[in-house]
Amino acid sequence: MKLRDLSVRQRLILNNIIMVLVPVLLLASIGSAVFHGLRATGNFRERELEILWPEAGDTIPVLMGLSHIFTNVDGGEKEKLERHVESMEEVGIEVAVLCDGEVTYESEPDTAQALIAESYEIVPGEGNVLLWDDRGLVYRYVSRDGKNIGVAMGPVPFQIGQGFFPPHMGGVWSAMGIGIFLLAAAIIVFVGLLLVRRMTRDIVAPLEELQHAARRIAKGDCDTPIVSHGTDELGETAAVFELMRRRLQQGQKLREQYEQNRQELLAGIAHDLATPLTKIQGYTGGVLDGIATTPEKQRRYLELVYHTSQDMEKMVHELFLLSKLELGKAVFQWEAASLRPILQQYVDRQKEALAAQGFALRFEDALAADDVCVMLDRIQFQRVLDNILSNAIKYKDGDSGRLTIRLSARDGGYVIECEDCGRDVARDELGQIFESFYRTDKARTDAAKGSGLGLAVTARIVEAMGGRIWARPAVPKGLCVCIWLPSKQSFAEDGKA
């Protein structure tokens, strides 16, 4: 596992452990070095005392040995004396220890009793003795219960000479101590700086990047991506920030699109209301100014005013319906219905009247199944068919036209293809004909062709019924509006009703 893969919490714990371990390891290393260094110079405790008690000189080994004899005789030390009195014996001091009348230690074999007797000859009496002068050393210690006795004797005059370390060693030790302290402090500071740098790189820097990104987003900049540099908590936070940025960017673009659509909608309303109002003003002005001099002409003007006001009323109703559909407030009376008889009846009711106007309407059933059941609102579905038929009639090519309604099955539902032979629509405009107030006539001069709301209302109704709507070019010419509606079962599974 790489360090980058650790979580922020794990990194902080690791940094704290390192900050604690470095001083501990340094102290352990320094202590171990001093310990083994003193060990290399001989008896460790003697060299240690020489460092702490330099004025004792070379008497340290003798004093240390006497101390161990004392504790051994008194029963406070169970270790063998050989290791502790070795330095004394090297300078000519003999040692003997008796416990409960038995010899437990003697420098030379079978010399313990003679050495004890000699100590009493030199210093008679029952008390404990420590005599160390120019003639040599006599040490005798008897335990409190009188059962144990320890003796050390030798022709070693009492003279403080130079110890193992030179006289100026104290200054050397002080300088070494200061140097070791400074080195340890430098190592600790260096390790601390490395840890701080790593924390800055791995924690502080990503946090600063997130802070800058948040400020950019607060200023409205949702286009600059936020880069995630890892999989830890900060990396996950950066990924969440990036997801938030994308959502805000989508929302921003959607608001811009809504604003553009709103402006186009207002422009369309203004235009399509201004045109009939201009007509009404012209006709009524003609009547008021006396242009319509005959009753027939006056009636004709008034009929035009009436029909224009009807067109305006229809457009207002379509706008109101479109608004309710987009807000999801339109009320649908759902029912299970079969598409085949609905489409057949729709065609039968209107084909004779349309044929008299030179427009052919027919129905083609490409379904093999008998039951073609969907969930729909009959009134709204009738509006869908009316809008498509009205659009085909308005944009027929010449005096005659045709609309074929074809029913087939596809993708767990049913497709209704409404194919006319009217004017062609450019491929790049096929996706826009379902927008409000959109006409293929860019100049919008032919207001008699409708308000441009019919197909927009149609699309919203189809979407509310859980379906899809799209357009494609007809062959050899014209437009084919395709509607897909889910079957009753699919509709219920999607929970539309």
Image (cartoon, rainbow, N blue to C red):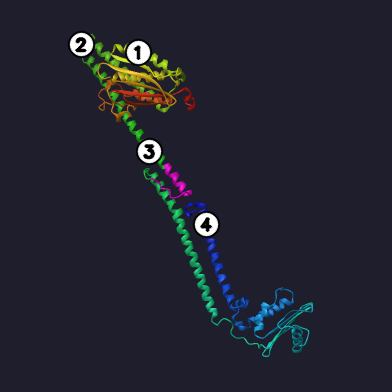
Instruction: Specify the label residue 350 is tagged with.
Output: 1
The amino acid type found where label 3 is placed reads: Gln
Q: Secondary structure at mark 1?
A: helix
Q: Which residues are magenta?
A: 225-244
Q: Earlier in the sequence, mark 1 or mark 3?
A: 3
Q: Is residue 227 magenta?
A: yes
Q: Secondary structure at mark 4?
A: helix
Coordinates of residue 420 in the picture (x, y in percent): 31, 20
Q: Earlier in the sequence, mark 2 or mark 3?
A: 3
Badge 4: residue crowd in 10 Å (few <14, some 14–19, many ≥20):
some
- The residue pinned by badge 2 equals 293
Can you name the residue that lies furthest to the front here? 368
Q: Earlier in the sequence, mark 1 or mark 2?
A: 2
Coordinates of residue 92 in the picture (x, y in percent): 67, 86
Q: Is residue 340 left or right of residue 97?
A: left
Q: Viewer-proximal residue, 18 or 104?
A: 104
Whether residue 210 appears in this view of the structure is yes
Badge 1: residue crowd in 10 Å (few <14, some 14–19, many ≥20):
few
Marks 1 and 2, how far apart at CA: 40 Å
Pointer 1 with pointer 2, Cβ within 8 A: no
Marks 2 and 3, how far apart at CA: 59 Å
Marks 3 and 4, how far apart at CA: 43 Å
